[in-house]
Amino acid sequence: MDSLRFTEHPILGEVKKGRLVTFTYDGKELQGYEGEPIAAALKAAGVMVHRYTAKKHEPRGIFCAIGRCTDCVMIVNGEPNVRTCMTPLTEGMSVRTQYGTSDKPFTDTAQSAVTRD
């Protein structure tokens, strides 16, 4: 899926491909290139939703890609609110979808609203 990969970042500059590394996304093993933004590795793997808003449980993903908004925040290695568009990928990272400020999914009602689309 290299065609979906970012090759240049507006703030970080040219994205240098490091070695291929394995990381987990919601418990599933994925691969990306060491040093590329986590968001780039997720996008290349087809992951578009990074978090759900606390109030309306709406999905969010990459928006500004320069660290100014909070749409791409996820729980990385147990730490919530990590801006994945600016955080470099490393071997063995644990990346989890964020629900409000937690990695615990909302009630079934919120999830059924997401799957209707």
Image (tube, grey):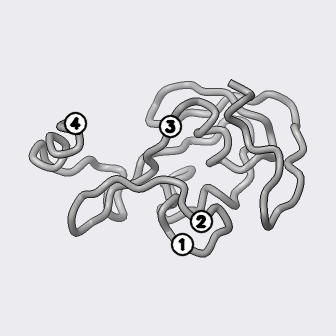
Residue placed under numbered mark 1 in the picture = 69
Quarter of the image for residue 98 reads: bottom left
- For the residue carrying disc 2, how many other residues have a C-alpha within 10 Å: few (<14), some (14-19), or many (20+)? few
Residue placed under numbered mark 2 in the picture = 64
Q: Amino acid at mark 1?
A: Cys
Residue placed under numbered mark 3 in the picture = 47
Residue placed under numbered mark 4 in the picture = 115
Cα distance in 3D space between marks 3 and 1: 18 Å
Residue situated in front as seen by the camera: 80 or 16: 16
Cα distance in 3D space between marks 2 and 4: 25 Å
The residue lying at 73 percent from left, 36 percent from top is 91
* Label 4 residue SS: helix
The residue lying at 60 percent from left, 75 percent from top is 68
Closer to us: mark 2 or mark 1? 2
**Disc on the earlier residue, 3 or 4:** 3
Vertical placement of 21 versus 101: above or below? above
Cα distance in 3D space between marks 2 and 1: 6 Å
* Label 2 residue SS: loop
Cα distance in 3D space between marks 3 and 4: 15 Å
Vertical placement of 111 versus 78: above or below? above
Q: Are marks 2 and 1 in contact (CB under 8 Å)?
A: yes
Cα distance in 3D space between marks 1 and 4: 25 Å
